[in-house]
Amino acid sequence: MRTNESLANLLREERRFNPPAELAGTANITAEAYEKARADRLGFWAEQGRRLSWQTEPTQTLDWSNPPFAKWFADGRLNVAYNCVDRHVEAGLGDRVALHFEGEPGDARPVTYAQLKDEVCQAANALTELGITAGDRVAIYLPMIPEAVVAMLACARIGAAHSVVFGGFSADALATRIEDAGAKLVITADGGYRRGKPTALKPAVDEALTRPGTDSVLHQLVVRRTGQETAWQDGRDLWWHEVVGRQPVEHEPEAFEAEHPLFILYTSGTTGKPKGILHTSGGYLTQTSFTHHTVFDLKPESDVYWCTADIGWVTGHSYIVYGPLSNGATQVIYEGTPDTPHQGRFWEIVQKYQVSILYTAPTAIRTFMKWGDDIPAKFDLSSLRILGSVGEPINPEAWVWYQRHIGGGRCPVVDTWWQTETGAIMISPLPGVTTTKPGSAQTPLPGIAATVVDDEAREVPDGAGGYLVLTEPWPSMLRTVWGDDQRFLDTYWSRFPGQYFAGDGAKKDDDGDIWLLGRVDDVMLVSGHNISTAEVESALVSHPKVAEAAVVGATDATTGQAIVTFVILRNNAEDDGDELIGELRDHVARTLGPIAKPKRILTVAELPKTRSGKIMRRLLRDVAEKRELGDVTTLTDSTVMDLIQSTLPSASAED
Ligand code: WT7
């Protein structure tokens, strides 16, 4: 890829942040870990495996005799739920708060490790009573309430694989996932609170279960959250508080093989039906535990951790449930949206619980930027000490805003790159070690082998761009696509034989640090130059008037593709029409070079996003190329597209 010139431009204004001195001395990991892992990668992971409590200690670390089907710690046996709950209670920490639950209406409930153990044991007994046994699949379709965590751990405890389906997904999406996994039970709720209102969930399950292919489901286990009126099918539908509530709080955890399935989590690709990403037990828990401990420098006795993701995404699995709980962390879980009842809700929660580690997404950070600096400034955020970002490339502007306005300039920001498929963080700064560069995920973690290659699978030199690949297996890697080994091979292992292809574009800077450029499908080809959408977006957001930007390549008769951009202005920025548009185009040209000058700039009020906050560029491309819109069912708000289309003719500026 010919991105060197624009990279140099992007780095011109490079800012660097050294780790705070006091952290460098007390951090959970030091720079030596890189050396150690380089000298003996498997020995390093074997050592991390000892973070867990095994019923049978593994003697093997990795079996790679049938690549890419890995077996980690294959002869070890453990119970994942025991590792996340019981062992902390046995260590005398039963009174420690595991979850500070904050409901959207403001109801709050702390759950200690001792209480969590009782609830998980009761739920495990209930699942057993309902005929669920090891190897079965259970679908979980719940709001962000403690029962979601309990349900996942109860499945893990009895060796049933959970398939959590995000509560915002439709009945159809749920039905497809139930059918593919052959789930025997659905755990759901009457509803949850979203944007100040009770929002029903169970009707979507009822509807899903009318679809052909879902008759594997024998029961719905229904948590009463909102108390709203709910249709009921006697015999099939059971209340959680009745069935779980009457169970004993004792349950003997059985140990399973390290490679026993832990969960399936579906990711939607650009085409075809969603892929059921399969994760297993020992390796997954080792890497989520290790990365949560080191990347966030967790001190479980004093930190209050908060990951704002939903448990319906992998971030919620790895960094709300398995990583933090295996480490005995105290954390906040929040049910609702960041602007209910007001735009300071997140900061109010940080202040209330004295949150010290915050893990959120660039899309949220850019939204907070748009709402204005004065909102977080009204709250006491001095408890914060580490800030994390995940989900998309974070543009330097948002990174610096996060560091300054949320972190008060004191907190290291860790930009963590990983995927549903990788199971745990792979590339990230370490807060007590790394001198950070805003916008870069920087370095593969100790024990992780990642690099950037060109079309011919050759590693690119420093200063050049290409495709991100992982060159060695890692403990929390996906084991296959559920029921479809061939798709696993085709999607991830065939583009560059012997290497895992992540689907992301990336480049190395002159120090060899990695900068992510977004999905390779999002790279534009303009007059023979490869330009990434992320770079142009980043350049736009570096302009003081722009809060958010989305960039697409639209077919163009002269240049192959033309750069079309959609921008949201900051709250305090005035839209003076053509003048502003000219200013922004020049700004991009100055930052990245004339080749990257957008052909069209449209100012919009909202951008189309998936429920996990990723911009749906595919739809914007449809708009830019004046086509019928494709599938909009995974949008958070489908009216956004009408809004964008209606602003189209007046807001455009063409050459
Ligand atoms: C894709 C994976 C990882 C949990 C949430 C998303 C993008 C993720 C970063 C980052 C640049 C990132 C990549 C990746 N991504 N984190 N720090 N910098 N890009 O999981 O839905 O499986 O998406 O998200 O494109 O491939 P996911």
Image: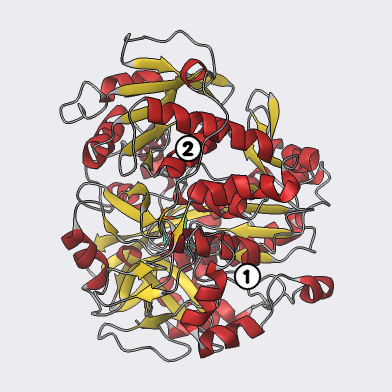
Q: Ligand 1 is located in which of the four quadrants?
A: bottom left
Q: Using the image, determine if residue 92 lies above or below residue 426.
A: above
| Residue 38, above or below 257 | below
How far across and how far down the image is residue 606, in percent? 48, 41
Q: Residue at x 52, y 84 (%)?
A: 509
Q: Which residue is mark 1?
A: 438
Identify which residue, 11 or 465, lies in the foreground: 465
Q: Are marks 1 and 2 in contact (CB under 8 Å)?
A: no
Q: Which type of secondary structure does the marked residue at label 1 adopt? A: loop
- Residue 209: x %, y % from top left: 25, 23
| Among the two numbered marks 1 and 2 on one chain, the one whose residue lies closer to the N terminus | 2
Task: Identify residue type, mark 1.
Answer: Pro
> Is 234 left or right of 352, judged from the image as shown?
left
Local secondary structure at mark 2:
helix
Position in image of residue 3 (x %, y %): 41, 81
Which dot, 1 or 2, sits closer to the camera?
2
Q: Quadrant of the C terminus?
A: bottom left
Please state if 178 lies on the left or on the right of 604 as rendered. Answer: left
> Which amino acid, mark 2?
Ala
Residue wearing tag 2? 154
Residue 545: where, in percent of width, then height? 62, 54
Quadrant for residue 496, please give it.
bottom left
Q: How far is mark 1 from mark 2, CA to CA?
A: 40 Å
Q: Residue at image x 34%, y 33%?
A: 132
